[in-house]
């Protein structure tokens, strides 16, 4: 009995030593590869994947939204637009253009109400009335909603099939109204996975957004629509 225990202990010790040797050999080879700068291709690709979503609320605006769409088209960049149903009338062509050019169109209620402060029936009207306007103008039925003031509730969640989209970078463009200040804020706080809150109702915002794209693309960022960040 005692001899068997000793024998098995010896066998396990030898196996352990062998696997340590194999591991050490692999580790040394990997270290050598990385020293030689030969980091494997898939790792590199994952590291380089830095995604940012620019989102624009409160539109469409008859002047600044087309100006922004022109700039995005020139740069082949897609953005996300959360529209107010009440702003669509008379701007249907702008909404149609958003869809045609591959941007994501979402809902921002009909009249910019705080959904948690009104009755569920009113909230339902605010949401579906906007979806109908977007569908009629673009042929697209929105799936995402940006609740005004970021106010959402479990009741709303249960009531509608729409997915709320919030943000994690807010340069307060509507208040700052300064191209450089807005752009600097986004460039400073921009990181992989950032969802930037902007409003396409101001010329300063349009200029800032385009400047941000030009700057961050040089740093290896890719601009995507929010659905591409939400799906992981
Ligand atoms: Ni808004």
Image (tube, helix red, strand yellow):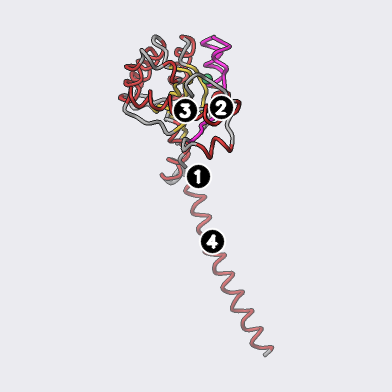
Which is nearer the N-term, disc 1 or disc 4?
4
- Between disc 1 and disc 3, the foreground one is 3
x 43%, y 46%: residue: 40
Q: Is residue 145 left or right of residue 104?
A: right
Q: Is residue 163 above or below residue 200?
A: below
- Marks 4 and 2, how far apart at CA: 58 Å
The residue at label 3 has a CB less than 8 Å from ligand 1: no
Density class for disc 4 (Cα within 10 Å; few <14, some 14-19, many ≥20) is: few
Image position, residue 157 (x, y; %): 54, 37
Residue under numbered circle 1: 35
Q: Nearest the camera: 71 or 151?
A: 151
Q: Secondary structure at mark 2?
A: helix
Tell me if residue 168 is in the magenta stretch.
yes
- Marks 2 and 3, how far apart at CA: 9 Å
Q: Secondary structure at mark 1?
A: helix
Q: Nearest the camera: 192 or 175?
A: 175
Q: Magenta span covers which residues?
A: 163-186
Given contact means CB atoms under 8 Å apart, are the residues at marks 1 and 4 in contact?
no
Q: Secondary structure at mark 4?
A: helix
- Marks 4 and 3, how far apart at CA: 59 Å
Given contact means CB atoms under 8 Å apart, are the residues at marks 2 and 3 in contact?
yes
Image position, residue 165 (x, y; %): 51, 31
Q: Secondary structure at mark 3?
A: helix
The residue at label 1 has a CB less than 8 Å from ligand 1: no
Which is nearer the N-term, disc 1 or disc 3?
1
Residue under numbered circle 3: 127
Q: Nearest the camera: 136 or 53?
A: 136
Residue under numbered circle 4: 23
Say the numbered circle drawn on residue 115: 2
Given contact means CB atoms under 8 Å apart, are the residues at marks 4 and 3 in contact?
no
């Amino acid at each position: 009995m005692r001899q068997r225990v000793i024998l098995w202990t010896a066998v396990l010790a030898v196996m352990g030593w062998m696997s340590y040797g194999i591991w050490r050999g692999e580790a040394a080879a990997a270290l050598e590869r990385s020293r030689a700068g030969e980091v494997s291709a898939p790792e590199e690709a994952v590291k380089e994947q830095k995604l940012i979503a620019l989102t624009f609320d409160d539109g469409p605006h008859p002047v600044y939204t087309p100006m922004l769409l022109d700039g995005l088209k020139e740069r082949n960049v897609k953005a996300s637009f959360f529209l107010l149903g009440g702003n669509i009338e008379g701007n249907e062509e702008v909404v149609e253009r958003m869809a045609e050019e591959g941007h994501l169109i979402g809902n921002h209620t009909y009249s910019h109400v705080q959904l948690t402060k009104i009755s569920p029936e009113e909230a339902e009207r605010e949401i579906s009335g906007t979806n109908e306007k977007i569908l009629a103008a673009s042929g697209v039925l929105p799936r995402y909603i940006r609740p005004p003031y970021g106010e959402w509730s479990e009741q709303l969640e249960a009531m509608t099939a729409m997915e709320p989209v919030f943000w994690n970078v807010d340069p307060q463009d509507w208040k700052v109204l300064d191209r450089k200040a807005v752009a600097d804020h986004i460039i400073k706080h921009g990181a992989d996975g950032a969802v930037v809150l902007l409003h396409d109702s101001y010329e300063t915002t349009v200029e800032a957004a385009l400047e941000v794209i030009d700057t961050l693309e040089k740093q290896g960022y890719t601009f995507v629509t929010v659905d591409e960040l939400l799906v992981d």
